[in-house]
Amino acid sequence: DGQDVAKGDVLVILESMKMQNELKSPRDGKISRVRIKTGDNVERKQTLLSVI
């Protein structure tokens, strides 16, 4: 939490069926809350973190 990020920075790498997908920051900002940790299973449309 609290880390500065720039638009396009990789925030999360999701792995599914041995494929990796990068989720990038939509804007400059600061990570305000991380709701997941390494190894967690996530659901479609689940909030993973917040950038303010």
Image: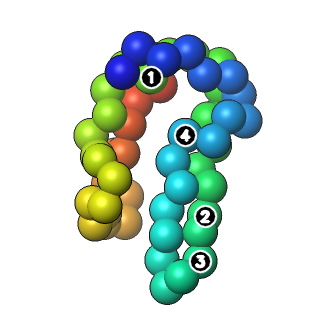
Circle 3/circle 2 CB separation < 8 Å: yes
Residue sitting at x 59%, y 69%: 20
User: On the image, which quarter does residue 41 sit in?
Assistant: bottom left
Dot 2 falls on a residue whose secondary structure is strand
Residue type, label 2: Asn
Q: Is 40 rendered above or below residue 29?
A: below
Outermost residue toward the right? 8
Of the image marks 4 and 2, the number of the one nearer the N terminus? 4
Mark 4 is surrounded, within 10 Å at the Cα level, by few (under 14), some (14 to 19) or many (20 or more) other residues, namely: some
The residue under label 4 is: 11
Sequence-first disc among 4 and 3: 4
Residue farthest to the front? Answer: 38
Give the secondary structure at mark 4.
strand
Q: Which mark is residue 31?
A: 1
Q: Which residue is mark 2?
A: 21
Who comes first in sequence, dot 2 or dot 1? 2
Residue 21 falls in which quadrant of the image? bottom right
Q: Amino acid at mark 3?
A: Met
Mark 1 crowdedness (10 Å alpha carbons): few <14, some 14-19, many ≥20: some
First reached walking from the N terminus: tag 4 or tag 1: 4
Q: Secondary structure at mark 1?
A: strand
Q: Residue at x 49, y 70 (%)?
A: 15
Query: Is mark 4 in CB contact (under 8 Å) with mark 1?
Result: yes
Q: How many angstroms separate mark 4 from mark 1 (CA)?
A: 9 Å
Q: In x, y percent, where is residue 52?
A: 47, 17
Q: Amino acid at mark 1?
A: Ile
Q: Amino acid at mark 4?
A: Leu
- Mark 3, residue position: 19
For mark 2, does the 10 Å Cα neighbourhood hold few (<14), some (14 to 19), or many (20 or more) residues?
few
- Give the x, y percent position of residue 23: 58, 50
Can you say which quadrant of the picture contains the N terminus? Answer: top left
How far is mark 3 from mark 2, CA to CA? 7 Å
